[in-house]
Image (tube, coloured by chain):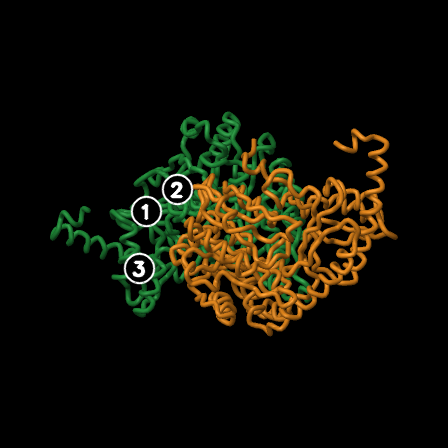
Chain colours: A orange, B green
Amino acid sequence: MFSERVLSINESPIRKFATHSLKAKEQGKRVIPLNIGQPDIQTPQAYFDAIASVSPTVIPYTPSNGIDELLEAFSDYYKAKGIPFEKSDLLITNGGSEALSFTFACLCDDGDEVLVFEPYYTNYNTIAKVMGVKLRAIVTKPEENFRLPSQKEMHSRVTEKSRAILVTNPNNPTGLVCTRKEIEDIIKTAVDNDLFIIADEVYREFIYDGTEFISFTEYPEIRDRLVVIDSVSKRFSACGVRIGCIASKNKDFIKQALKLCQSRLCAPYIEQVGAAALMRADQSCIAEAAAEYKLRRDVCMNHILNMKDIDCKCPQGAFYFILKLPIEDADDFTGWLLSDFDLDGDTIMLCPSAESYASEGVGKNEVRISYCIHADLLERAMLVLEKGLEEYRKVKAAQTEKEPAAALK
Amino acid sequence: MFSERVLSINESPIRKFATHSLKAKEQGKRVIPLNIGQPDIQTPQAYFDAIASVSPTVIPYTPSNGIDELLEAFSDYYKAKGIPFEKSDLLITNGGSEALSFTFACLCDDGDEVLVFEPYYTNYNTIAKVMGVKLRAIVTKPEENFRLPSQKEMHSRVTEKSRAILVTNPNNPTGLVCTRKEIEDIIKTAVDNDLFIIADEVYREFIYDGTEFISFTEYPEIRDRLVVIDSVSKRFSACGVRIGCIASKNKDFIKQALKLCQSRLCAPYIEQVGAAALMRADQSCIAEAAAEYKLRRDVCMNHILNMKDIDCKCPQGAFYFILKLPIEDADDFTGWLLSDFDLDGDTIMLCPSAESYASEGVGKNEVRISYCIHADLLERAMLVLEKGLEEYRKVKAAQTEKEPAAALK
């Protein structure tokens, strides 16, 4: 009755425990959300001022590539960072999601492949499946702190169906920030195999501990094979604005992608006005947010790094990390925390990581933790996690003693 | 370098003469736009009031299916029309375009077919091509006033690859409003061949001359095979708001489509708030807009029906009609009007119709005219069209005399 492609898509792990969470709340529990990248930091006032001051006439279609003032604001943002993207190099999209979806459609036909480092942002799965694109994983591992493998290993994953390498830097979900060596290994792999590089750099502003951020835009030799995916969502704590952009110096690519922009007419007018205001306003809010996220990360890490049987390294960017747990099944643990556990009325919602891996069976005992909520909540959440984990392991150990066969299933 | 699918997409005919138009304006001409469905009617004040009054905190992701107040507003709108769509039958989308795109992805795999009456809304081409869907045309003709063919003819176009029939009612670009017989012929074809019906009813409120509007939602026997595409764009003169919806009583369909909604997280928050306000406000604006569009249609028809060598019947719905012209090439004529013609400084921008046909070579001498701009402008535009056509035919006739071979090319 339905297409194979849609049937093959799993429910979003970020949202699949919504029903469990609702029940937990009905039981009177407080559920601290560690599952979703929804910051609690205030959206800058400039956004609200801009949308309130639009003069009331007609809300029209905008040009399919975006309104001029927003294109200019994005261009100025890049130029201030030494990246020479002109307005004509940019296309405004409905969030980073649409930017990626259009990029896949421009580069891949049904059955083509995009190389991606796993674990990766789970929505890449759906976007790829809808477009008939196969994600081909280049493996990175928690025990290696998710550092990228050798250039040789990257190269070995390329097939004749490969069209691009997708790189999320800083990374969601691992928090990894690529080193110059890693960036250059990716570039060599792309050049040697004539691949596009799709660089999802939406978290570029959130880098900690003086780590250097290397953007692919620093390498003029790949300007014709580089597509940058961007978004105002996290940078300005404005996820619901849903404004993103595609940036590329490849004029032919922009021309092709513009046809896809035309097919959905335009991004919403008011949101474009609001996004332009965000990018024109005092940008100190970005550094303030980054400082706040660093503090929140530290709250988590101070706890996590002292937890028993946990091996986790401190992430350098974005506001996520992956936690490999001393358990069998992160799905079961996530459900159990909501249904069967609380610490004086508090519990947590995690995001299991299996869907972040293209490799079968990998990541089943891992969760993604998002640390974009208030430090006090995170402090409490980490304690709930520790105590919950202790209790869960006791429960599981007891089950194993009683019914060894069932527990091993 | 790029995918076959994106290379196969032609530039939007609605926008492809933008450069010609710009040049005409630089020459000091006034270009009256008949090419695009961008109404000049004011967006209701309720929208502006709603977005200005959002309290300034965080603009968050919303639920992927939409904010509750908007789902409720859509549900109430349908119920007021006797259509029992509950909130759980609805998914809020980025305009009708995304609603259609998600519907195609849910029903079709690469190479599957959707039946569609031609001429059709040209963006269907792009949406289909991106999804690897083949549009299979059921032919309707200007000389038959675009009335739908017999049920037998519809049935004959079905193949084993067919998954759905897409029906735009009232129609863009023809202005046709389906009769009960036509609706029931479509239903029989769908039932006999186990097809979904995708009913694009975004123009449902714009029906003239007491013509009866028959919605597919009136037929309970097809509730499980019906997907309705809707949008606030035209109904509230709010094209730039980009809020649409998918409505279906088929719970499994909604469940599948929700996975696609989750992949792009949500529709924009503020636009959803604004759209809900539009649907909650005094609805008399809709009838007022319909009365205005009828007046505008009449201005066009009063002129068109008296034009020499033109055979056009009066459209009954939406705000478009197709004009078959006594020329060879509507693309050439459209460009010529902008580059080489003006009537005391005025010219017009048309939308050639060839892209509205899946059948090869059909519609080359047809244009779509959109009559959603002010009556005075339309009055003038029709005169420009008449005089331009006369002049163009003279020029072409002279060319044929001089260089018969070149003119026939």
Dot 1 surroundings within 10 Å: few (below 14), some, or many (20 or more)?
many
Q: Which mark is residue B232?
A: none
Name the N-terminal-most of marks 2 and 1.
2
Q: Image quadrant of residue A327?
A: top right
Indicate the position of residue B262 as horizontal and vertical percent values.
Answer: 62, 47
Front residue of B396 and A87:
A87
Res B308 seen here: yes
Helix, strand or loop status at disc 1: strand
Name which residue lies at 61% across and 51% down.
B265
Q: Which mark is residue B366?
A: 1
Q: Are marks 2 and 1 in contact (CB under 8 Å)?
A: yes
Name the N-terminal-most of marks 1 and 3.
1
Q: Is residue B281 left or right of residue B348?
A: right
Question: Which of labels 2 and 3 is toward the front?
Answer: 2
Helix, strand or loop status at disc 3: helix
Dot 3 amino acid type: Val
Front residue of A174 and B277:
A174
Indicate the position of residue A30 as horizontal and vertical percent values.
Answer: 81, 53
Q: Residue furthest right?
A: A344
Dot 2 amino acid type: Pro
Q: Which residue is disc 2 drawn over?
A: B119
Q: Which residue is disc 3 drawn over?
A: B384
Indicate the position of residue A264 as horizontal and vertical percent values.
Answer: 48, 51
Marked residue chain, label 3: B
Label 1 and label 3 in one chain: yes
Res B254 seen here: no
Question: Which of labels 1 and 3 is toward the front?
Answer: 1
